[in-house]
Image (cartoon, rainbow, N blue to C red):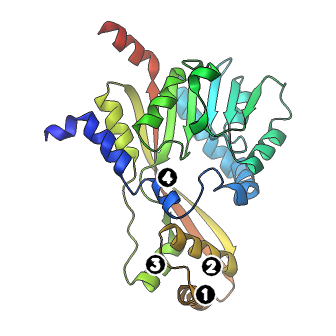
């Protein structure tokens, strides 16, 4: 039981966990910095359609409910993508530094911020992992550091680097369980002979280490889903991508198994897929931490 309160053990467990998002991507031969390049356009469209804007507004309203103010705030948005949050941050009066390494997403981000004054949103087209925070002059420079669903967080060291940039608040969101996908649930038993089971993700490491290290934070875990309709060919490609990410053979046998199933189960040629999972949000209050450190 003593190990439960030993931060060093939890740090090592997180670093060594082979099931973290980053480790899974690397083992599958996927470059995290390039993983969104091929779907940048569709991601941008989904981010700024009516449903996407509602999701963004829910997160921002939750932040405001916790005391975060956007007017005249300085915000570091890490993994900004095409501006899904950078744009509404700027619309609410914040000055935003947007870090994004995917060039297709950077191009879309440039388009999306063209309506603002030049100094409103500053794009940094670099990998955050390769940025020297001290050299950039980013140490405790931002009222809010915002990291939403970005693989830049993969161990406690990466969290500390992010926290170092924040003066008041730091927001981190990440999966609390492995992704849920109705198509995977259907085809997984056909390929493996076993049902697909979701797993807990590294959100637990983050929350417990914040607790052990004396941080004050608010957290929320929600279950979110969305439904999309795609062609049989698109569904086949998505299923094969899942197999690849889980290091299962993407061969002729499995391709034929999935293709035959889709043809029988979806004779119309349209496949309805429900996606989602549990997602965690954490807002860390750096003012409270700084006060605690001064007191001790």
Q: Measuring 73% from the left and 35% from the top, which residue is drawn there? A: 87
Residue 77 in sight: yes
Relative to 176, does residue 207 appear above or below in the rendering?
Answer: above
Q: Residue 19 is drawn in which quadrant? A: bottom left
Other residues around mark 1 within 10 Å, as few (<14) / some (14–19) / many (≥20): some
Q: Earlier in the sequence, mark 2 or mark 3?
A: 3
Tell me if mark 4 has few (under 14), some (14-19) or many (20+) residues whose alpha carbon lies within 10 angstroms of its own: some
Question: Residue beneath label 1, please?
Answer: 259
177 relative to 103 in the view: left or right: left
Give the structural element (helix, strand or loop) at label 2: helix
Residue 137, how many percent across, how many down? 62, 18
Which residue position holds label 2?
236
Quarter of the figure with the N terminus: top left
Q: Nearer the viewer, residue 185 or 23?
A: 23
Specify whether residue 138 is in view.
Answer: no
| Mark 2 touches mark 1? (CB < 8 Å) | yes
* 15 w.r.t. 5: above or below: below
Q: Earlier in the sequence, mark 1 or mark 4?
A: 4
Q: Which residue matches tag 4?
A: 22
Which of the image's four quarters has the C terminus? top left
**Place of residue 39 in the rendered image (x, y in percent of width and height, measured from the top left):** 71, 59
Q: Nearer the viewer, residue 108 or 18?
A: 18
Q: Secondary structure at mark 3?
A: helix
Which residue, given by chain and number where applicable, does mark 3 sit on? 188
Q: Residues within 10 Å of mark 3 (few under 14, many from 20)?
A: some
Comes first in the chain, label 2 or label 1: 2
How far apart in space, not on screen, are marks 4 and 3 (Cα)? 22 Å
């Amino acid at each position: 039981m003593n190990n439960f309160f030993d931060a060093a053990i939890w740090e090592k467990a997180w670093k060594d966990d082979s099931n973290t998002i980053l480790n899974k991507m690397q083992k599958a031969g996927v470059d995290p910095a390039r993983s969104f390049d091929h779907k940048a356009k569709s991601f941008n469209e989904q981010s700024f359609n009516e449903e996407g804007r509602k999701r963004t507004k829910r997160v921002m309203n939750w932040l405001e409910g916790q005391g975060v103010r956007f007017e005249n705030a300085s915000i570091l948005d890490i993994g900004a993508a095409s501006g899904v949050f950078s744009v509404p941050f700027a619309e609410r009066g914040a000055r935003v530094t947007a870090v994004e390494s995917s060039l297709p997403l950077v191009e879309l981000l440039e388009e999306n911020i063209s309506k603002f004054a030049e100094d409103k949103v500053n794009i940094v087209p670099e990998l955050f992992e390769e940025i020297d925070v001290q050299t950039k002059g980013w140490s405790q420079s931002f009222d809010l550091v915002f990291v939403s669903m970005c693989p830049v967080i993969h161990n406690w060291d990466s969290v500390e680097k992010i926290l170092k940039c924040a003066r008041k608040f730091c927001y981190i969101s990440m999966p609390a369980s492995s992704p849920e996908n109705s198509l995977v649930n259907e085809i997984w038993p056909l390929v493996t002979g076993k049902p697909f089971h979701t797993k807990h993700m590294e959100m637990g490491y983050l929350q417990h280490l914040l607790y052990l290290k004396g941080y004050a934070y608010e957290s929320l875990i929600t279950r979110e889903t969305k439904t999309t309709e795609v062609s049989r060919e698109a569904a086949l490609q998505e299923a094969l991508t899942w197999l690849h990410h889980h290091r299962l053979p993407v061969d002729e046998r499995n391709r034929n198994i999935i293709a035959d199933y889709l043809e029988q189960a979806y004779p119309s040629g349209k496949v309805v897929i429900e996606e989602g999972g549990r997602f965690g949000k954490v807002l860390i209050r750096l003012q409270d931490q700084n006060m605690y450190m001064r007191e001790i």
